[in-house]
Image: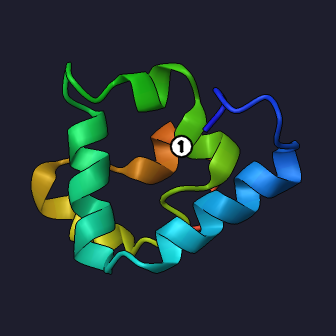
Amino acid sequence: MDEFPTFCFFERYSYAKNIRAQFSNHSIALFIINAYSPLGNIWINEKLIEKYHLIKNLPVSLLIPFGKDVRKDFPNIEFDM
Protein backbone atom coordinates (compact mmCIF):
# COMPACT_ATOMS: atom_id res chain seq x y z
CA MET A 1 0.00 0.00 0.00
CA ASP A 2 2.83 2.36 0.74
CA GLU A 3 4.16 1.74 -2.76
CA PHE A 4 1.43 3.90 -4.31
CA PRO A 5 2.78 7.45 -3.88
CA THR A 6 0.07 8.91 -6.10
CA PHE A 7 -2.50 8.23 -3.37
CA CYS A 8 -2.56 10.22 -0.16
CA PHE A 9 -2.53 8.45 3.19
CA PHE A 10 -6.29 8.89 3.62
CA GLU A 11 -6.95 7.11 0.30
CA ARG A 12 -4.59 4.25 1.19
CA TYR A 13 -6.15 3.94 4.66
CA SER A 14 -9.65 3.88 3.16
CA TYR A 15 -8.59 1.16 0.75
CA ALA A 16 -7.12 -0.91 3.60
CA LYS A 17 -10.29 -0.38 5.61
CA ASN A 18 -12.41 -1.70 2.71
CA ILE A 19 -10.19 -4.73 2.30
CA ARG A 20 -10.21 -5.44 6.05
CA ALA A 21 -14.02 -5.33 6.08
CA GLN A 22 -14.11 -8.25 3.64
CA PHE A 23 -12.27 -10.62 6.00
CA SER A 24 -13.75 -12.71 8.79
CA ASN A 25 -12.22 -12.67 12.26
CA HIS A 26 -10.65 -16.06 11.59
CA SER A 27 -9.08 -14.78 8.36
CA ILE A 28 -7.60 -11.82 10.21
CA ALA A 29 -6.29 -14.18 12.92
CA LEU A 30 -4.62 -16.28 10.23
CA PHE A 31 -3.14 -13.11 8.73
CA ILE A 32 -1.54 -12.09 12.03
CA ILE A 33 -0.19 -15.59 12.61
CA ASN A 34 1.40 -15.36 9.15
CA ALA A 35 2.83 -11.93 10.01
CA TYR A 36 4.73 -13.51 12.91
CA SER A 37 6.38 -15.97 10.49
CA PRO A 38 9.63 -15.26 8.62
CA LEU A 39 7.76 -14.96 5.32
CA GLY A 40 5.18 -12.51 6.61
CA ASN A 41 7.20 -10.46 9.07
CA ILE A 42 7.51 -7.55 6.61
CA TRP A 43 4.02 -6.54 7.80
CA ILE A 44 5.35 -6.12 11.34
CA ASN A 45 8.84 -4.86 10.49
CA GLU A 46 7.52 -2.04 8.30
CA LYS A 47 4.74 -1.33 10.82
CA LEU A 48 2.06 -1.69 8.15
CA ILE A 49 -0.28 -3.50 10.54
CA GLU A 50 -0.23 -0.60 12.97
CA LYS A 51 -0.22 2.11 10.33
CA TYR A 52 -3.34 0.82 8.59
CA HIS A 53 -4.94 -0.90 11.63
CA LEU A 54 -5.18 -4.13 9.65
CA ILE A 55 -6.11 -6.22 12.68
CA LYS A 56 -8.45 -3.71 14.30
CA ASN A 57 -11.41 -5.32 16.07
CA LEU A 58 -9.73 -8.72 16.14
CA PRO A 59 -11.00 -10.69 19.16
CA VAL A 60 -7.87 -11.33 21.21
CA SER A 61 -9.30 -14.67 22.33
CA LEU A 62 -8.70 -16.09 18.83
CA LEU A 63 -4.93 -15.90 19.29
CA ILE A 64 -4.65 -17.07 22.90
CA PRO A 65 -4.35 -20.76 21.85
CA PHE A 66 -1.27 -19.78 19.82
CA GLY A 67 0.41 -18.16 22.82
CA LYS A 68 0.37 -14.65 21.38
CA ASP A 69 -0.91 -11.58 23.15
CA VAL A 70 -1.21 -9.13 20.27
CA ARG A 71 -2.08 -6.31 22.66
CA LYS A 72 1.57 -6.23 23.75
CA ASP A 73 2.93 -6.26 20.19
CA PHE A 74 0.43 -3.71 18.86
CA PRO A 75 -0.45 -1.33 21.72
CA ASN A 76 -1.89 1.35 19.42
CA ILE A 77 -4.65 -0.87 18.01
CA GLU A 78 -8.06 -1.32 19.60
CA PHE A 79 -8.94 -5.00 19.98
CA ASP A 80 -12.20 -6.70 20.88
CA MET A 81 -12.11 -8.77 24.01
Residue 31 sits above or below residue 2 on the image: below
* Rendered location of residue 21, percent (x, y): 50, 78
Is residue 80 among the parts visible in the rendering?
A: no
Residue for point 37% across, 68% down: 60
Q: Indicate left or right for 56 with 2 as reference.
A: left
From the viewer's perspective, tell me whether residue 55 is left or right of residue 9: left
Q: Residue furthest front?
A: 6
Q: Residues within 10 Å of mark 1 (few under 14, many from 20)?
A: some
Residue 19 place in picture, x, y as percent: 50, 67
Of 30 and 75, the residue lying toward us: 30
The quarter of the picture where the C terminus appears is bottom left
Q: Position of residue 57 (x, y in %)?
A: 52, 74
Query: Element at badge 1?
Result: helix
Residue 29, x across and y down, in percent: 27, 62
The kind of residue on which mark 1 rests is Ile
Q: Which residue is mark 1?
A: 49
Vertical position of residue 80 compared to residue 5: above or below: below
Q: Residue at x 20, y 19 (%)?
A: 38
- Note whether 14 is above or below 66 in the view shown: below
Specify whether residue 26 is in view. Answer: yes
Residue 47 versus residue 11: which sits nearer the camera? 11
Of residue 47 and residue 15, the one placed in the foreground of this image is: 15
Q: In the image, 17: left or right of 33?
A: right
Q: Residue furthest left?
A: 65
Q: Quadrant of the N terminus?
A: top right
Colouring scheme, one of rainbow, by chain, secondary structure, one colour: rainbow
Rendered residue at 33%/64% (across/down): 28
In the image, is residue 48 above or below residue 19? above
